[in-house]
Image: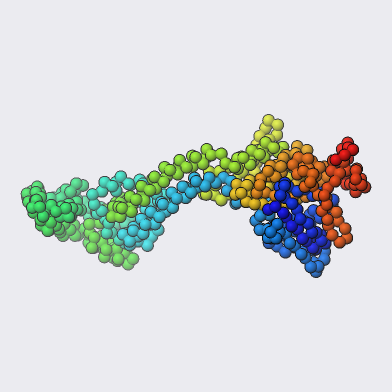
């Protein structure tokens, strides 16, 4: 913006103001306005434009209001291109936008991509597992509780059994209907004393039969292993190549086809499950089940899957084995998720370390404040890494109160209660600096309307804010309209960075407000301004300037 065109009528006591402000040669214009002239009214009008609110005359609300604030192309200034700095606003704090000062876009983008890749892989895996299990449960919670002590460690659970799943030769329990077993009522039933005793007796008989089997061996070669071998040999053309399998036991036997091997396996299974003593033990379990009407479906399911009975004595291990079988059945999506998660976790730690080590513009802002402003506290960033990576939206600050050689951490609300008004205003300026630096980083064209922000400051802090306003004036994307009723401040910024030609004085009549080229800034008693300014200088207690002959 090169020119700011202002045309106002009946805006908060400004009956009329028409002026063009030229920013083409300098990015800051200062206006000295005595009390009641126009300063607060103009600031409020710009606030209205910023907030897209209607301006009006508070005393005479029926008067027609005109508010035209445009650039050199007669284009109305965009709302977000205006930032009004009030003398003091205790409620104003840094915004979500100012947290962008912490964001390293490259790190944030890579971090987000890692999370998205893992999330996509997770969705595919859970979709496949849901089909595999036919379960209506929260599968993440179920998997977590199967392998950890809580239901909140889904990825920890997956990684913990990775090697075991890879080593599995077959998914023995892959076709189990998960909800048929891991129902709350069924699990409670299986824990009752009579049921535990009946299952224990059944397993003892079962183990004896396995031990007496011609070919099966407990823990090494059971019918699960045998069935897997039969399938793998057939799928890989073993029998088609005229190879044979030699089984040794109480009876040696040579198998030359898959069908022959499967028939032998089924015969061994039938011999075990149809054993009279074992059937009797199973009937005891059936009797206990029939006492509970809620277990009918489980009973029917168990009749079709008698192979499960020996595993019911250790339901925790069975749960783990079933999930491992599910993972093996969906191995491609399982291993893809685990590998991506592990790779992402490794890279995430590297990115987080880089984020912690990285100096950000927030540190620059805090350094500006800590070094330039004189207040009894120091600031530190609390959650920088989380904000850099987008895990938290807003930055948290830690405050350390300093009293001589003693230091103590303090909360913001408590801090504000013990600060003087000047110190509170200095803290308010900190938040203004955040906003300015955020706009600077975004290269956002902005008109700052500064309304006596240094009022009530002591000399050191007033000098600090003047120096910061000078820094703002050096940014080509920024323009400043500085309003003040403090003539000493007006004279100081004129000499520091605004320049004589960009200093204006407001005068108010019954019909309008005018902005005129300032004169007599260095010598207020020349050129007919003595009467106009003497009273004001005395009020401000700044009547200490040695009169000079010329400006």
Rendered location of residue 277, percent (x, y)? 17, 57
Rendered location of residue 290, percent (x, y)? 28, 65
Rendered location of residue 529, percent (x, y)? 90, 47
Residue at x 14%, y 53% (from the top left corner): 237
Q: Mark yes or no: residue 215 visible.
A: yes
Left/right of residue 362 with respect to residue 296 in the rendered view: right
Rendered location of residue 272, percent (x, y)? 16, 56
Residue at x 12%, y 58% (from the top left corner): 259
In-front residue for pair 460/143 = 460
Left/right of residue 124 with respect to residue 65 in the rendered view: left
Quarter of the rendering containing residue 230:
bottom left
In-front residue for pair 60/171 = 60
Residue at x 47%, y 42% (from the top left corner): 351
In-front residue for pair 513/438 = 513
Residue at x 19%, y 60% (from the top left corner): 279
Quarter of the picture holding the C terminus: top right
């Amino acid at each position: 913006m090169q020119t700011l065109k202002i045309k106002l009528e009946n805006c908060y006591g400004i009956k009329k103001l028409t002026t063009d402000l030229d920013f083409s040669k300098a990015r800051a214009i200062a206006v000295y306005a005595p009390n009641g002239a126009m300063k607060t009214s103009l600031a409020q009008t710009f606030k209205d434009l910023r907030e897209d609110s209607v301006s009006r005359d508070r005393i005479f609300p029926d008067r027609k209001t005109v508010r035209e604030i445009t650039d050199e192309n007669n284009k109305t200034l965009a709302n977000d291109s205006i930032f009004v700095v009030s003398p003091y606003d205790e409620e104003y704090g840094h915004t979500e936008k100012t947290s962008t000062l912490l964001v390293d876009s490259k790190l944030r983008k890579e971090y987000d991509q890692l999370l998205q890749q893992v999330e996509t892989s997770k969705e595919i895996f859970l979709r496949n597992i849901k089909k595999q299990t036919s379960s209506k449960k929260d599968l993440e919670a179920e998997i977590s509780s199967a392998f950890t002590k809580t239901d909140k460690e889904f990825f920890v659970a997956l990684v913990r059994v990775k090697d075991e799943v890879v080593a599995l030769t077959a998914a023995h329990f892959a076709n189990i209907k998960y909800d048929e077993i891991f129902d709350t009522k069924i699990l409670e039933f299986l824990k009752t004393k009579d049921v535990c005793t009946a299952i224990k007796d059944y397993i003892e008989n079962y183990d004896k039969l396995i031990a007496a089997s011609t070919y099966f061996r407990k823990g090494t070669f059971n019918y699960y292993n045998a069935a897997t071998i039969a399938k793998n040999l057939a799928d890989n053309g073993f029998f088609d190549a005229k190879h044979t399998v030699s089984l040794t036991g109480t009876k040696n036997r040579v198998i030359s086809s898959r069908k022959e091997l499967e028939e032998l396996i089924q015969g061994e299974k039938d011999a075990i499950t149809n054993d009279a003593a074992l059937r009797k033990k199973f009937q005891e379990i059936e009797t206990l089940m029939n006492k509970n009407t809620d277990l009918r479906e489980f009973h029917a399911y168990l009749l079709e899957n008698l192979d499960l009975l020996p595993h019911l004595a250790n339901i925790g291990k069975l749960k783990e084995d079933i999930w491992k079988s599910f993972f093996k059945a969906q191995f491609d999506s399982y291993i893809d998720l685990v590998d991506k998660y592990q790779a992402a976790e490794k890279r995430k730690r590297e990115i987080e370390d880089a984020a912690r080590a990285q100096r950000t513009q927030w540190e620059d802002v805090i350094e500006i404040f800590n070094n330039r402003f004189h207040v009894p506290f120091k600031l530190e960033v609390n959650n920088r890494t989380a904000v850099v990576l987008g895990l938290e939206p807003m930055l948290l600050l830690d405050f350390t109160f300093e009293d001589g050689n003693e230091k103590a951490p303090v909360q913001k609300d408590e801090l504000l209660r013990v600060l003087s008004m000047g110190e509170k205003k200095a803290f308010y300026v900190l938040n203004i600096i955040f906003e300015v630096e955020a706009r600077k980083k975004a290269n956002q064209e902005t008109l700052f309307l500064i309304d006596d922000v240094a009022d009530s400051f002591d000399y050191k802090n007033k000098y600090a804010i003047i120096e910061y306003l000078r820094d703002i004036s050096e940014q080509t994307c920024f323009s400043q309209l500085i309003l003040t009723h403090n003539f000493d401040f007006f004279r100081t910024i004129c000499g520091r960075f605004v320049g004589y030609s960009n200093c204006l004085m407001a005068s108010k009549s019954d019909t309008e407000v005018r902005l005129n080229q300032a004169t007599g800034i260095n010598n207020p008693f020349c050129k007919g301004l003595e009467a106009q300014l003497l009273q004001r200088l005395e009020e401000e207690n700044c009547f200490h300037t040695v009169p000079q002959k010329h400006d």
